[in-house]
Every structure is written in structure tokens, then in C-alpha cells.
Amino acid sequence: MEQAFFLLFASIAVASACGVVLLKNPVHSAVSLMACFIQIAALYILLHSPFLAAVQLFVYVGAIMVLFIFVIMMLEIRQATLERFLPGSKYIALVFSVVLGSAMLWLLFSSPLLSQIPPPTPSASQGSVSELGQALFTQYLLPFEVVSIVLLVALVGAIFMTHKGDG
Amino acid sequence: MAPLSWYIALSVSLFVIGLYGVLSRRNVLIVLMCLELMLSAVNINLVAFSYFLSHLGGQIFAIFVITVTAAEVAVALAIVIAFVRQKGSLKIDEISIMKG
């Protein structure tokens, strides 16, 4: 049952990811990427991490993609959609990506370590929000604070760069 | 339930699709979207290992990746807006100001 759901979500995710790369209109690409992110959130629920699924929906679908679509609508896009691919690099990039992907898959399936991982023991508290919060605010407190400063700096930088006038 | 190798295979395929988009598309906005796709593929990997090894570190790291991605998108879109204001184009092969 769970495998069937995994295959469903994974095939929709891969199809919409191909849509992001191949579609001509940036708005269509953005909607396709949104569909892909929703499938990934469903996969997080299959992996028993509901908090990350919620964060994925809020941050990616709710914030980042809306920002993308807002910028697409703000800018004039017609001239940029005429030519989809960079001249000359289309097939080289395809060959490079396929070689890299098959190398990664070959390394993955030829590794003896993969079969040594035991099946996870289902426990009620594993991956729960309270456990996650406790780890985030005790063991990982310093990275948490650093990441908040990163967000602040990005905010100031974005405002500064889009500020009209002094450029 | 689905084995770990399936999740890694899905992650690899999403990463490769995103990589192809980053390398070949001409529109800056779509290149950024494909970058998001690659980061999401990495997140799937982290969460899958976190679940199969029963260790919370992967989920915590995925949260940090999502946060840094949000910051990156804000800065990148600000750069795109500034670039379009200056040059009036979204083509990635015309971003060559830093070359001197």
C-alpha cells in the first residue's frame, strides 16, 4: 500500500519536474514546480515527518513560489520566452546530466552498505514535533541562531538591492 | 513500505533533472527554479536517511536547508530585479558584467 503511494507521488514529482525544465512559459514552470513540491511534502508524510511536510508546504509552496510568480508578473517576460535553451549547450548538458545520474545510481546500487541498513523501528514519538523542537533548541541551538542572522542579512540585502534611486 | 534505495533513486532523478535545467535553460527565473528543485532533491535524501537510521539530525538539517533556500531566493530575485532594471533582459548569457 505504502509502496503504491510512493510510486504515485514519485512519478507525479518526476513528471512535474520534467515540466519545470521543458515548459516554455515561466508561469507554467512555476505551477509545475509547485505540483512537484506538493508531491515532495506527501513523501515527507510517508517518511513520518509531518512537521517537515508542513514546513515544505508553508515555505516552498506558500512563500517561495508566490515570490517567484510575483517577480514573473512584475517583469516583462515576453522576449525571454522566445528561446528556451542556451545556444549550443543543450546536448552537452543533457549528456553530462545523464552520465552523472547513471554514475550516482550505479554507485548507489553497487554499494554493499545499502543492504546493511536495518528497517526502521516504528515508534510513536520518532519524528514528533516536540522531539524535533527539543533537539533544535538544545543540541542545534548555535546553527539555529546563525541561520536567523543569515535570514536577517538576506532580508536587508534584498531590500538594499531592489531599492530604487542610489542603485 | 518503500525501501531506502527508492527514495535515493527518486532524489537522484530529481537532482539530475534540476541540473539539466540549470545547465541548459536560458531564462534566469527558470534556472533559479531548477536550483530549488535540486535543493529539494537533497532534502528528500536527508529526510529519508533520518527516518531509516532513526536519527533526528537529518530532519534538522533539512529545516536549515529550507531556511537558507528562502534567504537565497530572496537575494537571487533581488539581483534578478536589479539586473532587469539595468539591462532589460532575462537571458542568462547576458549576465557578464563581472567579467570586466
Image: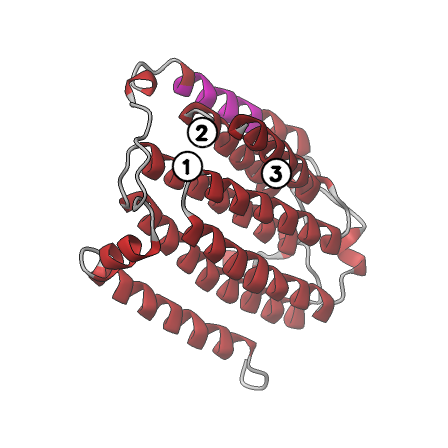
Q: Which residue is mark 2?
A: B8
Between the residue at mark 3 and the residue at mark 1, the CA separation in whole angstroms equals 15 Å
Judge if badges 2 and 1 mark residues of a common chain. yes
Q: Amino acid type of disc 1?
A: Asn
Q: Amino acid type of disc 2?
A: Ile
Residue extending furthest toward the front: A124
Q: Which residue is mark 1?
A: B45
Q: Is residue A163 magenta?
A: no
- Secondary structure of the residue carrying numbered label 1: helix
- The local crowd at label 1, few if under 14, some if 14 to 19, many if 20 or more residues have their Cα within 10 Å, is many
Among the 4 quarters of the image, the one containing residue A140: bottom left
- Is A131 on the left or on the right of A6, as rendered? left
Q: Amino acid type of disc 3?
A: Ala
The magenta-colored residue range is A97-108
- The local crowd at label 2, few if under 14, some if 14 to 19, many if 20 or more residues have their Cα within 10 Å, is many
Seen in the picture, residue B43 relative to A97 is either above or below; the reply is below
Q: Position of residue B76 (x, y in %)?
A: 52, 62
Q: Position of residue A51 (x, y in %)?
A: 42, 54
Confirm or deny contact between disc 2 and disc 1 (CB under 8 A): yes
Which of the labelled discs sits on residue A13, or is there none? 3
Between the residue at mark 2 and the residue at mark 1, the CA separation in whole angstroms equals 6 Å
Among the 4 quarters of the image, the one containing residue A116: top left
Quarter placement of the N terminus of chain A? top right
Quarter placement of the C terminus of chain A? bottom right
- Secondary structure of the residue carrying numbered label 2: helix
